[in-house]
Amino acid sequence: MILAAGRGERMRPLTDATPKPLLKVRGKPLMQWPMEALAAGGFTQLVVNTAWLGEQIEQRFGTRCAWDTGLASTLGYSHEARDFGGALETAGGIVRALPLLGEVFWVAAGDVFAPDFGFSRAAVERFVAGGRLAHLWLVPNPPHNPKGDFGLDEDGLATDDGIAGAATRFTFSTIGLYRAALFAPPWCDIAAGNPDGVRAPLAPLLRAAMRKAQVSAELYLGPWTDVGTPERLDALNAP
């Protein structure tokens, strides 16, 4: 699943007429980078959630998109603004899209640039064998998030505190593997398929699962940018 429903307020005026995931980085739409990377890993069935100017995203990619690499992806859409008037936040959006997803699935944000990240079958196999509800990729804290989001213990479990009680925390890259069970009771009380359009963030679900040792994680040290401001976009596109 590619998350592409955000308004991109901090990117205005660039996002007044263009959805943030379609802003170009190094010659192609920002969201196209993870879409192509998923296809390169063998994951060619994609689900995209949309809200702000979401019709532009479907017009750009359609239901089947061929990449320059010779690979192609098929796309399904969850149009949150059309159905509910606006974005449902991350957990709400995932629950809404669950009928289009499998029991295990990737989620990546369409406004994060991680050009070297590899979406691998081996990672999925390890996750399935491990039996946990989620596996997250964490990154060193960028200047705009100096306190980080989650800890990582010596057993490879994500925590809501630092390592061994220390202050060390890392930033959630937005890239993760999930089981559909995380988005159902007892972890999530939104009705299946989110027919009422409940808006709900993802972090509380993850923290609850972390407290039961149900979230594993690892560090990703490759290039990574949360393209949250025009200045960060300009930096990526600088010659």
Image (tube, rainbow, N blue to C red):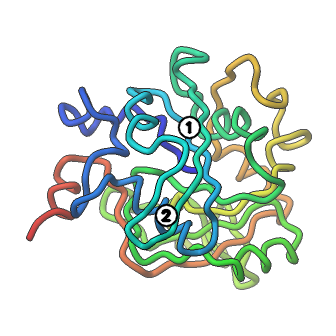
Q: Viewer-proximal residue, 3 or 22?
A: 22
Seen at 60% across and 70% down, the residue is 162
Residue 113: percent from left, percent from top: 37, 62
Dot 1 corresponds to which residue?
49
Tell me which label, 2 or 1, sits earlier in the chain. 1
Residue 169: percent from left, percent from top: 53, 68
Left or right: residue 59 versus residue 157 is left
Seen at 80% across and 29% down, the residue is 190
Dot 1 falls on a residue whose secondary structure is strand
Q: Give the residue type at disc 2.
A: Thr
Q: How many marks?
A: 2
Structural crowding at the residue carrying mark 1, measured as other residues with C-alpha within 10 Å and reported as few (<14), some (14–19) or many (≥20): many
Seen at 21% across and 64% down, the residue is 236
Dot 2 corresponds to which residue?
171
Left or right: residue 116 versus residue 49 is left
Residue 135, by quadrant, is bottom right
Q: Give the residue type at disc 1.
A: Asn
